[in-house]
Amino acid sequence: LQMLFEFQSQVARLLGTDVANASMYDGSTACWEAIVMARRVTTPLRSLVLGTQRLSRGEYDVPVEHTDRNDEVGYLARSFDHMRIGIAEQQAEIRHLAYWDRLTGLPNRERFRDTVLQAIEAHAVYTTQAMPLAVITLDLDRFKHVNDVLGYAFGDQLLQAVQQFGAANQGAV
């Protein structure tokens, strides 16, 4: 009897009525309302589970649904969406650090290797004639000596100056 009264109170709160009016509903109406209420919670939760599965696959471009709700489900959805954005930003930074030199902003050795391999593959796929492919490298003689004698801070400044010179004169040859 106590459980029935608690259930009627919950239904009354959801419907905006008092307990006396809620008791006028027959059992089938109350049951139907309980099903509707359960679906109101479980449907968005299923959607949030699907959203977390997308995140686990690395799909960060699809926003999480139900962020516009003003209840616990909406709060949870907004938290998942903030997590999605944060993970996407971290992954982008990791990818950037894996292929670009932090000091000079230039592509690193791995990026260079990938770019050359892609150029060779693209050249082989799109051309039927043998055409030359050139790679130009730049070596700073005795750079280790500069670091050892003048220090790493000076060596870093030298690398940055060479990068700026190259950027300013790109295409001048």
Image (spheres, rainbow, N blue to C red):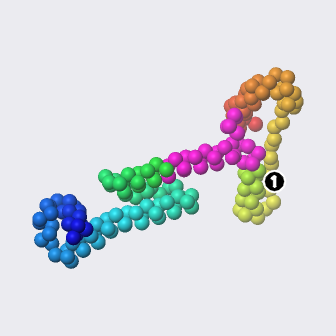
Asked if residue 111 is among those painted magenta in the image, a careful observer would answer yes
Question: In which image quadrant can residue 118 be found?
Answer: bottom right
Q: For mark 1, what is the residue?
A: 132
Q: Is residue 7 left or right of residue 41?
A: left
Q: Is residue 84 above or below residue 36?
A: above
Residue 166, how many percent across, how many down? 73, 33
Q: Report whether residue 47 is seen.
A: yes
159 or 167, which is in the foreground? 159
Which secondary structure lies at badge 1? loop
146 or 140, which is in the foreground? 146
Q: Residues within 10 Å of mark 1 (few under 14, many from 20)?
A: few
Residue positioned 23% across, 64% down in the render: 6
Q: Report whether residue 162 is seen.
A: no
Q: Quadrant of the C terminus?
A: top right
Residue 46, how many percent across, how many down? 42, 66
Asked if residue 41 is among those painted magenta in the image, a careful observer would answer no
Q: Which residues are magenta?
A: 84-112
123 or 131, which is in the foreground? 123
Q: Is residue 148 above or below residue 49?
A: above
Residue positioned 20% across, 60% down in the render: 13
Q: Magenta segment, principal secondary structure?
A: helix
Q: Quadrant of the N terminus?
A: bottom left
Q: Is residue 145 left or right of residue 57?
A: right
